[in-house]
């Protein structure tokens, strides 16, 4: 339970930040409209009337207004150009070596000591 709540909260925040919440509300509105129309009509007619753009329900109009409002919140340069908005850009500083890497000393303390004698191997054990 301790891990489930933060994961669900993070998932909810991600859904809200990506605008998928409006998509979920729109799907809910379509499902509700279809179930209301299916009570009195056959499935084909209910489906065609559900997705008829000339007959939106109140929830569909609310989602449409929210999407229009979200589009007005975007900067004009991002909306019209199709380019991505760069929020952060980190350019690393160039690395300069004082010595040529071929001239580096191999027995420096940074490399650690080299072993010259063979590694002792214990004799094989006899299976009984």
Image (cartoon, grey):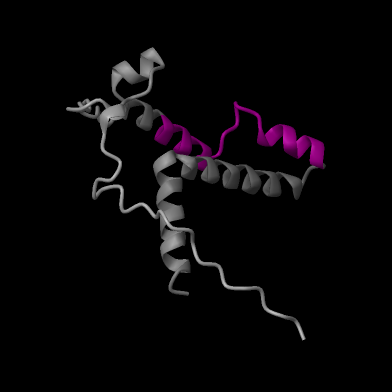
Q: Is residue 107 visible?
A: yes
- In this view of the protein, which residue sits in the foreground, 18 or 111? 111
Q: Is residue 75 above or below residue 40?
A: above
The residue furthest left is 98
The residue furthest top is 81
Q: Answer left or right for 111 relative to 118.
A: left
Residue span colored magenta: 43-67
Residue 61 magenta-highlighted: yes
Question: Residue shown at 55%/41% (left/top)?
Answer: 26
Residue 15 position in % (x across, y down)? 46, 47
Q: Answer left or right for 41 relative to 112.
A: right
Q: Is residue 78 above or below residue 106?
A: above
The quadrant holding residue 82 is top left
Residue 25 position in % (x across, y down)? 52, 45
- In this view of the protein, which residue sits in the foreground, 114 or 30? 114
Question: Residue shown at 47%/38% (left/top)?
Answer: 63
The quadrant holding residue 94 is top left
How many numbered badges does the structure rendering display? Answer: 0
Residue 16 position in % (x across, y down)? 42, 46
Q: Give the dominant element type of the magenta stretch: helix, strand or loop.
A: helix
The residue furthest front is 117
Q: Is residue 100 above or below residue 5?
A: above
Q: Is residue 102 above or below residue 79?
A: below
- In this view of the protein, which residue sits in the foreground, 85 or 60? 85
Question: Which quadrant: the C terminus?
Answer: bottom right
- In this view of the protein, which residue sits in the foreground, 54 or 3? 3
Residue 106 position in % (x across, y down)? 30, 41
């Amino acid at each position: 339970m301790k891990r489930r709540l933060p994961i669900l909260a993070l998932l909810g925040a991600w859904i809200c930040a990506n605008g998928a919440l409006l998509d979920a509300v729109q799907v809910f509105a379509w499902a509700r409209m279809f179930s209301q129309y299916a009570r009195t009509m056959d499935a084909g007619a209910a489906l065609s009337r559900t997705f008829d753009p000339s007959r939106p329900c109140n929830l569909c109009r609310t989602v449409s207004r929210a999407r229009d409002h979200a589009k007005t919140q975007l900067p004009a340069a991002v909306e019209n150009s199709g380019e991505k908005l760069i929020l952060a850009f980190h350019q690393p500083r160039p690395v300069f070596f004082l010595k040529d890497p071929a001239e580096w000393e191999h027995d420096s303390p940074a490399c650690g000591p080299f072993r010259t004698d063979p590694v002792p191997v214990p004799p094989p054990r006899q299976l009984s």
